[in-house]
Image (cartoon, grey):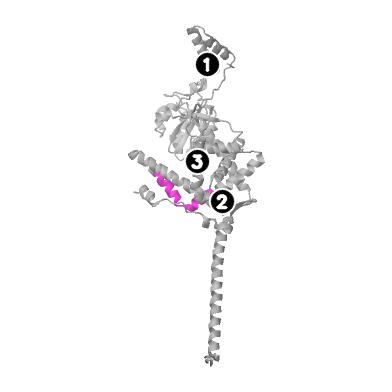
Amino acid sequence: MAKQNQKIKIKTKKHLAREQREAKQTRTIIIITSVIGAVILGLVGYGIIDQMVIRPRIPVAEVGDTVIRLNEFESQVQYTRLQLLNQIYQYYTYSQQFGEYGSSFLQTAQSIAAQLSQPVSIGNDVLDEMINGILIKEAAEEQGIRVSEEEIDEAIRVAFGFFPDGTPTPTTTATIVSTPTLSETQLALITLTSTPTATELPTETPEVTPSPASKKEEIDETEEEQTGSEDDESIVTEIEHLDVTPTPDISPTPSLTPTLYTTKIFGENIKEFNASYSIYDFDIKNLRDIFEVNLLQDKLIEVISAELEPIKAEVWARHILVETEEEALEVLSKLDEGGDFHELAATYSTDESNSEDGGNLGWFDQNTMVKEFSDAAFNLEEGEISDPVETTFGFHIIQVLGKRESQIPSAEFEGEKQDAFNTWLSEQRDARDDIVIHDEWEEYVPTTPEIPQQLLGALYQ
C-alpha cells in the first residue's frame, strides 16, 4: 500500500518567536505570583510571630534587672477592667433593688463607668502597681520575709468565700476611751456649761467570750442549786484544772458556723475562673501572684510600722474667734486684766457653735483643726493662753485646758500604718535611678473589655 503523505507543520521564525515570548511571559507571571505568594506568606508569618513572640516581649517598664513585658501588662489591665465592669453590674443591680433609695448606688456605678472610659489612666495605675510589686518583693527578700504556698492558698479560699473550717463571724473590738477626772487646775480655769467632749467612737458592743474564771463561777452556782451527780462532779473536776488567772484584756473569739460550700464546688469555681479569664491571658496563677504581693505587703507594713503605737496626743482647748487682729489684742488685754474667758467668748467670739459654751472645743488631736491652730494649741501648756493666731477663719485666742494621751481606734491605727507604708514606698521609688518607663507604653493600653451598650444605656437613661 502506498503510504499516505502526512502534513508536516513547519514552524516559521515568526511562530518560534511568539512561543518564546509566551513562555517568557508565563515564567514571569509564575515568578511574580511566587514572589507575591512568598511576600504574603512572609507577612502572615511575621504577623503571627509578631503577635505570638515579638509583641508580647516588648518591654513596657524596667525596675533594675526586672522587666515588665507587654503581655503581663495587657493581662493585668484587662483583669482590672473586668473587675471594674463587675463592680458596675453590682452597683447597678443594687440601685434597681433599692428603688428610690438606690440613687447613690447608681452614682457609684456611673463613676466607675467614667473611670473605664479613661484607659490610659487605668493603665497608669496598673503600671504603678506592677512597679510597686517589684519593689515590695525586693524589700521583702532583703528583710527575709517570705510567703508560703499555704498562705496564698488560704488567701485564695477567702477571696472565693470558701471556709472549709467554718465561716468566721466578725466581732467588734472594744476601744478604750480615756475619761480623766478634771484636775484642780482645770476646775479653777473653767466655768463651762458642758463637759469636754471626746472624738466620737463606734458604739457597737463587742461580743466577749467568757473567761475560764467566769465559766467556773457559773458551774459553781449550778452545783449549789442541783444535787450532786457523777456528771456534775466530773465537770467540776475538769474545771478545777483550768487556768483561772484573770486576764486584763479579753479579745473576742470568732464563732464558726458550718458551710455548705464544699471543696468540690470550690474546685469547680477555680475552673470557671480560668475559663472566664483565659481570653485575657489571665488565670489563677496570675491571681496567686497578686495575692503573694499583697501578703508580702501586709508583712512589710508590720515591719515598717513596728515603732508606731496606737496612742495619740490630744488637747482640750477653748478659743475666742474674732475677725481682726485688733479685736484679738483687745480680748487678750481684757484676759490679762483678769477678764473671764467664758464671758468674753460669749461677748466677742464669732464661732456660734461654741461661743455660749465659753468657746469649748473639747478634746482633739493634731489633725483635727487647721495646721496653724493645731500648732499653736499643742505648743501651749495647760492653762496657758496664746497670742492671736491667724487662720482662714480669722484670729483666735486659744487656751489649753488639758492634755492627755488616748488610744487610737483600731481602724484609724490601721490607716496610720498604711500611711507609713505609703511614705516608705514613695521614698523607695524616689531613691531608685533604675526605674525606666518606656514612652510608648500608652500605645499598648487595652480598651477591652468594654461596657456593653445595653448596660451603658441603662446607666444613663
399 vs 300: above or below? above
4 vs 388: above or below? below
How crowded is the residue under tag 2: few (<14 C-alpha within 10 Å), some, or many (20+)?
Answer: some
Q: Which residues are magenta?
A: 107-127
Residue 398 position, x and y percent, is 49, 32
Q: Quadrant of residue 13?
A: bottom right
SS category of the residue bearing label 1: helix
The residue pinned by badge 1 equals 215
Q: Is residue 112 magenta?
A: yes
Q: Kindly indicate whether the residue at mark 1 contacts the one at mark 3 (C-beta within 8 angstroms).
A: no
336 vs 14: above or below? above
- The disc label shown at residue 448, or none: none
SS category of the residue bearing label 3: helix
Q: Amino acid at mark 2?
A: Glu
Dot 2 or dot 1: first in sequence order is 2
The residue pinned by badge 3 equals 268
Residue 335 position, x and y percent, is 47, 29
Q: Nearer the viewer, mark 3 or mark 1?
A: 3
Q: Is residue 53 magenta?
A: no
Q: Amino acid at mark 3?
A: Glu
Please give the name of the residue rendered at 56% of the width and 42% of the height, measured from the top-left corner. 288
Please give the name of the residue rendered at 41% of the width and 27% of the height, measured from the top-left corner. 357
